[in-house]
Image (cartoon, rainbow, N blue to C red):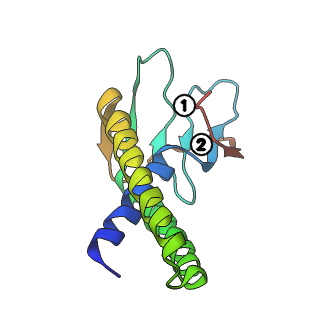
Amino acid sequence: MRPALLLRIVLVATALVLFDLLTIERTDTCPDEHLPSLIGLPLPYRTSIPWVNSMSGVLYAQGLLVNIACWSLVLTGINLVFTRLIGNAQQVQRPWRVTGMVLTVLATAFILLFLLFIEWRVEWSPDLDFRCPGSSVRFLHTGR
């Protein structure tokens, strides 16, 4: 696999993780606790961003790296299947490359916006202890 393609896959995978395309929200359901939610699939990589704290949160490096690795494997598999299907057909290869470039530019822009506009504190892994754990699967999670 070419290094440029690998970089593209990692950038798109990072954007998919940060975009919360498919995620699990882990919450503490005890009424007397006010802990933030942990968000990420398969591992939590960030906390929810409450309006009270004005766009700040905790980013967990361990969860982020594992989630990026998982999405990269999925995208690599999709890329391999698609390239095997199209073979050497020039009519399809050019749009496939253009689509890859556009996705890479959009992913890079989203990653920069996500990391620059929110005040993140970086930790290795979550240390929140939920007394009444609850979780729900979310698609395109908005954080509310």
Residue type at mark 1 is Leu
For the residue pair 118 and 25, the one nearer the viewer reads as 118
Q: Is residue 134 above or below residue 31?
A: below
Mark 2 or mark 1, which is nearer the start of the sequence? 1
At a point 43% along the width and 58% down the height, the residue shown is 98
At a point 42% along the width and 18% down the height, the residue shown is 53
Label 2, residues with CA under 10 Å away: few <14, some 14-19, many ≥20: some
- Residue 118: x and y in percent read 35, 28
Helix or strand or loop: what does disc 2 sit on? loop
For the residue pair 50 and 11, the one nearer the viewer reads as 11
> In the displayed structure, does residue 49 sit left or right of residue 118?
right
Helix or strand or loop: what does disc 1 sit on? loop
- Residue 76: x and y in percent read 48, 74
Residue type at mark 2 is Phe
Q: Is residue 143 above or below residue 20?
A: above
Tags 1 and 2 in contact by the CB under 8 Å rule?
yes
Query: Which quarter of the picture shows residue 136?
Result: top right
Mark 1 vs mark 2, CA separation in Å: 8 Å
Residue pointed to by mark 1: 35
Q: Label for residue 52?
A: none
Residue pointed to by mark 2: 130
Q: Which quadrant, please, contains the C terminus?
A: top right
Q: So how many labels did they put on this image?
A: 2
Q: Is residue 66 above or below residue 37?
A: below
Q: Is residue 14 visible to us here? A: no
